[in-house]
Each structure stands twice: as C-alpha cells, then as structure tokens.
C-alpha cells in the first residue's frame, strides 16, 4: 500500500519581531538582516508553547483528512522545545484530540529533522500495513540565546500531517530516503537554556552536505532528475541557505520555496520545511511534483518526492491557509517578546 498525505494543518503566531530591531538592540551591522534574508520572525505569545501550537495544527490536519480520533493509529510529535523535559508531548495532544488509546505515541528528537523523521516512519508504517493513518506534528518555539545570531532567525510555528493510504490523498509520497552522519554543528547540553552552534561549520559540512547528499540519493534511487520536479523545499535556517543549496543542485531559483515562500518569517525548527509543504499543498496545481528535503543538526536529512493529487484544492478549503496566517500579523517590540518568552528573570527578594 502506497502512502500519502490525507490532511494537513499549520499554526503561525500572529506576533512578529523585526530583524532590524534585533540588530539595533544588540549592536549588529544594520545590513545583517538583509544578508540573512530576514525581515521579521514569528514569536509565540506567553500562553503558547509547542504543545498548544501543535494541537491547533493537528486539529486542522484531521479536519482536512476527515479523520476522527478512532482513525489515528500513531502520533509522532517532533520538537526541540517541548514544555516538559521528561513527559511526552504526543500524549497530551493525542488525548486533547480524542485519539483512541490503542495507538503508538512518541516524541521524536533530532533537532529540526524530528518531524521529517516522523514522516519517514509513518510512510513505513502505512506501506507495511502496521498503521492505517498516522498523525505527524512538528512544533517549536523560538530557541536562541538573546543577542546570538540565532536570535534573528529562531521563530515559532507548528505544522501537522495525517499520513495514510495514497488513494484519495491530497499528495502521494512516491519515494523517500534518509542520509545521516555524526556532525556536531549544533547542540544544547543538559541544563543549558539555549542551544549553541559552530558558526560557519553549520553550513558546510552540515546543512549543505546533508541536504545535497539526501537529494542526490533520492534521485539516484528513483531515476528522477532535477527537471522532473516542479518545486523544491529545503529546511530554512535563514532566508539565504535554501537558495544556495538549490544552486548546488542545479535547481532554478523560481522553483525554490524559501521559508514560507514570501515573506520569510524565520526558522520554525521542526515546522520549517514542512510549513513550506503545507503552503504548497494549498497552492500548487495537481500533478505537481515536489522535492522536500529536511535537515536536523547532529546531523541528518530526509528527502521526499511528493506528487500533488486532484483532491488537494478541495481539501485546502477545509481549514485556514498558511498564506492567511502569514498575513495576519501584529508587530511587537523586543521587550514584549522578552516578556512573552520569559527572557527577563525577576529579582525576587532583592
């Protein structure tokens, strides 16, 4: 049995923080935001976290799929900013959605690749017949040390997909492959509040090597060529890297989906590339073939060949569109953002 995407949903917080304000506050060159391909980033409100955002996206995905809780056999929750250090987020969301208790449910961790990993696992479960439908969620809040370069791009958002039989789906997943090595480009040690990164090392040999290798491996195994794809989506640590990796693969810039198409609202970690996929499912014409390649530091990539089906335009009408969420925005200051995310610690007792 072939696998497909039967429903999808997304959540993007309405609050936006200007990249130029971040640069001015921390004393960066004012040209840096443009160099990163950044104008603003989405930030979660103080009552939002990975679970609440993931629940909203998953609810929409199930609505589009026409699926009830009894239809879901597995729930995978990919995040690197879960509310509890030791307690699964998948179980919270599953119960809130009314998913049956006879199910597989687990949190996945592989930096920004965790949700893509959940997609790969889901394809295997569906194709083998071990699961009829799975629910894959990628959700993260901004994780960056204030003033660090990550502070410009680390944003908040969520996406979810119901993966099931390809017949009648919005998009068929016709092939997938993974490419993984031990490359320490990005990490957060125990009890450290923020992740650290290896500066330029995060580009090559981490991001570029893994995405290019996974994409080429997919094409070698399927016989597909660059010209067979109508769109390409890559993980977006910033607004510039997806375009650079496209040039390395020989993909025309007009086929690339940078960030959330336009405007780019930051690196939403586990929702990053998959938010681009959600937007394309709402806009790309049927029969379009999409090259999707995720990336997670540490490091690894999953590459997928996905073909949009005739039912996608009708299913898109069943929920809020990514484009509308991008355009629904409220500007906030860095001080408001700091308050929302608890960056300012109160001096209790003097």
Image: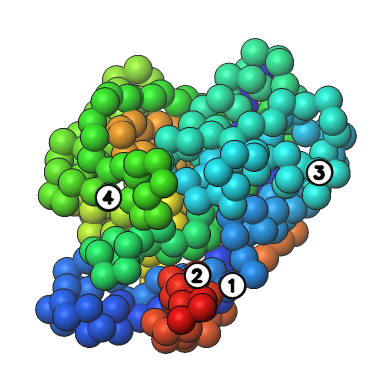
Which is more N-terminal, label 3 or label 2? 3
Question: Image point 43% across, 35% down: which residue?
Answer: 110
**Image location of residue 119, percent across then percent down:** 54, 33
Which circle's residue, 3 or 1, is located before the other in the chain?
1
Task: Measure the alpha-carbon separation of dots 2 and 1.
Answer: 6 Å
Determine the image quadrant of residue 100: top right
Lower sequence index among marks 4 and 2: 4
SS of the residue at dot 1? Answer: loop
Q: Residue 244 placed where, x, y %?
A: 19, 51
Mark found first going from the N terminus, 4 or 1: 1
- 121 or 84, nearer to the observer: 84
User: Mark 4 and mark 2: span between their CA atoms?
Assistant: 18 Å
Residue in the image at 71% along x and 16% along y: 130
Where 229 sits versus 179, above or below? below
Residue at disc 4, secondary structure: strand
Q: CA distance from mark 3 to mark 4?
A: 34 Å
Tell me the SS state at disc 3.
Answer: helix
Q: Which residue is mark 1?
A: 46
Depicted 232 relative to depicted 181: above or below = below
User: What residue is at 64 percent from the left and 20 percent from the top?
Assistant: 125
- The quarter of the rendered structure image containing the N terminus is top right
Tags 3 and 4 touching, CB below 8 Å: no
| Neighbour tally class for label 2: few under 14, some 14-19, many 20 plus, Cα within 10 Å | some
Tell me which colouring the rendered structure shows. rainbow
The reply to whether discs 2 and 1 touch (Cβ–Cβ < 8 Å) is yes
Residue highlighted by disc 3: 95
Residue named by callout 4: 196
* Residue 238 on image: x %, y %: 29, 59
**Mark 3 against mark 4, which lies toward the viewer?**
4
Q: Residue 338, relative to residue 279: is it above or below?
A: below
* Residue that badge 2 annotates: 341
């Amino acid at each position: 049995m072939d696998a497909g995407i039967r429903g999808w949903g997304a959540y993007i917080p309405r609050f936006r923080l200007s990249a130029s304000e971040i640069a001015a506050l921390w004393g960066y060159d004012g040209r840096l935001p443009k160099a990163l391909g950044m104008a603003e980033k989405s930030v979660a409100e103080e009552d939002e976290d990975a679970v609440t955002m993931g629940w909203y996206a998953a609810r929409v995905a199930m609505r589009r799929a026409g699926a009830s809780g009894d239809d879901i056999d597995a729930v995978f929750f990919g995040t690197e900013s879960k509310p509890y250090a030791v307690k699964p987020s998948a179980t919270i969301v599953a119960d809130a959605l009314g998913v049956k208790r006879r199910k597989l449910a687990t949190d996945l961790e592989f930096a920004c690749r965790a949700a893509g990993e959940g997609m790969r696992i889901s394809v295997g479960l569906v194709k083998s017949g071990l699961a009829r439908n799975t629910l894959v969620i990628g959700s993260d809040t901004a994780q960056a040390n204030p003033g660090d370069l990550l502070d410009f791009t680390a944003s908040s958002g969520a996406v979810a997909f119901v993966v099931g039989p390809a017949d009648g789906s919005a998009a068929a997943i016709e092939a997938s492959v993974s490419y993984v090595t031990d490359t320490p480009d990005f990490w957060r040690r125990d009890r450290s509040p923020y992740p650290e990164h290896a500066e330029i090392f995060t580009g090559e040999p981490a991001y570029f090597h893994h995405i290019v290798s996974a994409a080429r491996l997919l094409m070698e195994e399927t016989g597909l060529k660059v010209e067979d794809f109508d769109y390409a989506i890559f993980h977006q640590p910033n607004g510039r890297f997806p375009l650079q990796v496209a040039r390395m693969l020989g993909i025309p810039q007009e086929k690339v989906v940078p960030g959330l198409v336009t405007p780019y609202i930051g690196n939403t970690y586990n929702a990053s590339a998959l938010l681009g996929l959600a937007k394309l499912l709402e806009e790309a014409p049927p029969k379009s073939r999409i090259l999707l390649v995720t990336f997670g530091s540490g490091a690894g990539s999953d590459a997928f060949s996905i073909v949009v089906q005739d039912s996608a335009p009708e299913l898109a009408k069943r929920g809020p569109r990514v484009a509308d969420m991008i355009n629904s925005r409220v500007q906030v200051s860095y001080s408001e953002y700091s308050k929302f995310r608890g960056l300012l610690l109160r001096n209790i007792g003097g």
